[in-house]
Each structure stands twice: as structure tokens, then as C-alpha cells.
Amino acid sequence: MAVISNGTTLIDNGILDAAIPTGKMTLIKTLTASSSSTLSFVDGTSDVVLDDTYDEYVFKFYDMHPENDTVNLQINASTDGGSNYNATKTTTFFLAYHTESNSATALAYYTSRDLAQSTSAQQIVTIGNANDDSASGTLTIYNPSSTTFVKHFMSRQQAPTGEATQNCKDTYVAGYFNTTSAINAVQFSMSSGNIDSGVIKLYGIGG
């Protein structure tokens, strides 16, 4: 039995037509930090693809651990192949947290963490540097190769804050790179000190 939509065969005898996009995730590149000042994904360099091959790119973070305590994992982007990480961006930042001592909870919008037409790096999560502290999460950039529209992105991360105020923190960041030039490089760093350890994987969605 075939499934047909608007004259196009989608499924025939239980098999999806090869021309139908599946939205699968394709691993493009893995970078592993080791006392690294930055981790950079540059289109066309070291097997990185960040162009019109995919409409959606997802970065997945695994146990990002900072050198210094209570610092921010942050991102910036480039339109010139990584020569300058200074893409103009407007963003919004909010988070929920719950302390280990059960003494406080909050769901709050942080105006100090958002950006308005800024070329500064965008903070996406604050991390402590105790031996068992790390952050994990995702960052998605939509259609970075567009030369017509601004480039939307969203991030969600989970981390303990730091030694002084241990808590479970769930952070949300969304925004756009306000440029019609293609975004062709993305860089990750800590707001102070190195990325002591951690893994970032870049995936393309679609195909």
C-alpha cells in the first residue's frame, strides 16, 4: 500500500521514498577541550561544514568544565571565516534555578545577560569549577548561510553555578545575528580563563 500526497509517493510498501527529507542528524565535527582558550568551528576548515548544506546546525555540549570558578560559557560568530568574531546580535536570557540547600528557587529574566545590537560574546550559562561541576546542553543556529535574513539561534543549558551558591540552573538564551551576511564560523570560550575540559559536537539537520 502506498501513501501519496499531492501526487507524490511518500511511502510505498512500507518504505520511505529516498527523495523525502528525514530530518536526520549528521555528525559533522567533534572538538575536545584541554585547557583551551577557545573552541572554533570554521566552515571549510578541518572538515567543518557550516554553509547551505543544512538549514539547521546543532551544537551539543558535554561536561564543559571551566578553569576558573563561576564563569560563563559564551559564544560569538563570524562572517569572515573566523578572522573576527564580532557578529552583531540581539538576545534575551532567562533561567530557572533551585539551590542544593532547598533555600531558594527562582524563574527570572536577566537583563544583565542579554544583548542589544552588540558585538560582544553572548553568555549562555554560568559554571562552577569544582571537580564534579560541568555544563551540558545545546545551541541551535537556523539557516546560517542565508544572505537575505538575519540568523536565529537558541540555547538551553544545565549547570551548577559555583562553589559559593551551589544550585541546579536551567538557562535559556535566544536571539539573532543581525546580519544578512552568512555566518560561517562559531567560537566558544569562557568569560575568564580556559575551557579546562569538555566536548562540543556539531551536527547538521536534514538531508
Image (cartoon, rainbow, N blue to C red):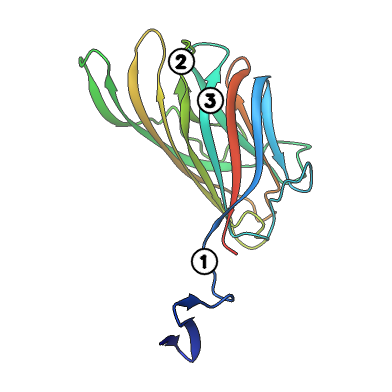
Residue 190: image location, x then y, percent: 58, 22
Residue 122 shown left or right of residue 51 in the figure: left
Amino acid type, label 3: Met
Structural distance between the alpha carbons of marks 2 and 3? 10 Å
Amino acid type, label 1: Thr
Disc on res. 98: none
Q: Split into 4 quadrants, where in the image is the C terminus? A: bottom right
Question: Residue placed at 49% from the left, 92% from the top?
Answer: 7
Amino acid type, label 2: Gly
Q: Earlier in the sequence, mark 1 or mark 3?
A: 1
Residue denoted by label 1: 22
Q: Split into 4 quadrants, where in the image is the N terminus? A: bottom left
Please tell me how crowded label 3 is: few (under 14), some (14-19), or many (20+) other residues with Cα within 10 Å: many
Tag count: 3
Which of pointers 2 and 3 indicates the residue nearer the eye? 3
Structural distance between the alpha carbons of marks 1 and 2? 39 Å
Disc on res. 128: 2
